[in-house]
Amino acid sequence: MIWFHFHQPDNDKPKLAKRPSETASLRCSVIDGSVYDGDTFRVKCDNREQKIRLCGIDAPEAKQPLGIESRDYLRSLIAKAKSQVIVVEMDRDRYGRTVAEVLFDTAEGEQSVQEEMLKAGK
């Protein structure tokens, strides 16, 4: 599994995220039309909606160069997963979003959305 560094909102020191196997995970459905950019979308888990911010990556905003391409690639990964993802909460950011490792099932096993985004350069 990959280790990710991300910014902790209450101070300037980065925090090393826990491995997903060490934290609780939820199976969730990505809400149709909710992919805002290449690292933010909404899910429904146990009848509760959450806004998810992918940990460990910073994709361009939709209005920035390559932002639409990044958003569309994330949409394609979610479509490939039939909108079913595994959310491993790591933290909450200053906007109240769940900062999470997100995985999806494939024939080869679980795949990291973040890893796929990085491999594709998105």
Image (cartoon, helix red, strand yellow):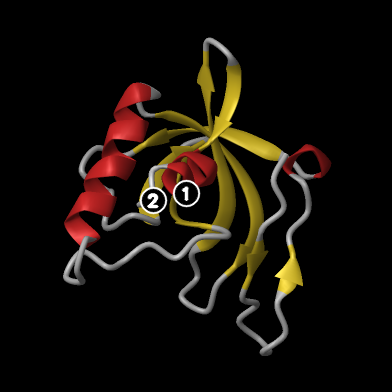
Q: Residue at x 38, y 57 (%)?
A: 40
Q: Nearer the viewer, residue 70 or 85?
A: 70
The residue type indicated by label 2 comes to Gly
- The image shows residue 37, relative to residue 22, as above or below, that is below
Q: Along the horizontal axis of the image, is 54 left or right of 29?
A: right
Residue 16: give x, y in percent of width and height.
76, 65
Q: Is residue 117 left or right of residue 102?
A: left
Tell me the number on the disc at residue 118: 1
Tags 1 and 2 touching, CB below 8 Å = yes
Q: Tag 2, which secondary structure? A: loop
Mark 1, Cα crowd under 10 Å, few <14 / some 14-19 / many 20+, is some
Residue 90, quarter of picture: bottom right
Image vertical order of residue 121 relative to residue 13, above or below: above
Q: Residue at x 58, y 14 (%)?
A: 108
Q: How many other residues sit within 10 Å of disc 2, few (<14), some (14-19) or many (≥20)? A: few
Tell me if 80 is positioned left or right of 18 in this view. left
Question: Which quadrant holds residue 98?
Answer: bottom right
- Residue occupying image coordinates x 61% and y 17%: 109
Q: Position of residue 55 (x, y in %)?
A: 56, 58
The answer for how far apart the CA atoms under marks 1 and 2 are is 5 Å
Identity of the amino acid at label 1?
Leu
Query: Residue beneath label 2, please?
Result: 121
Residue depicted at 27% across the width and 68% down the height: 61
Q: Quadrant of residue 11?
A: bottom right
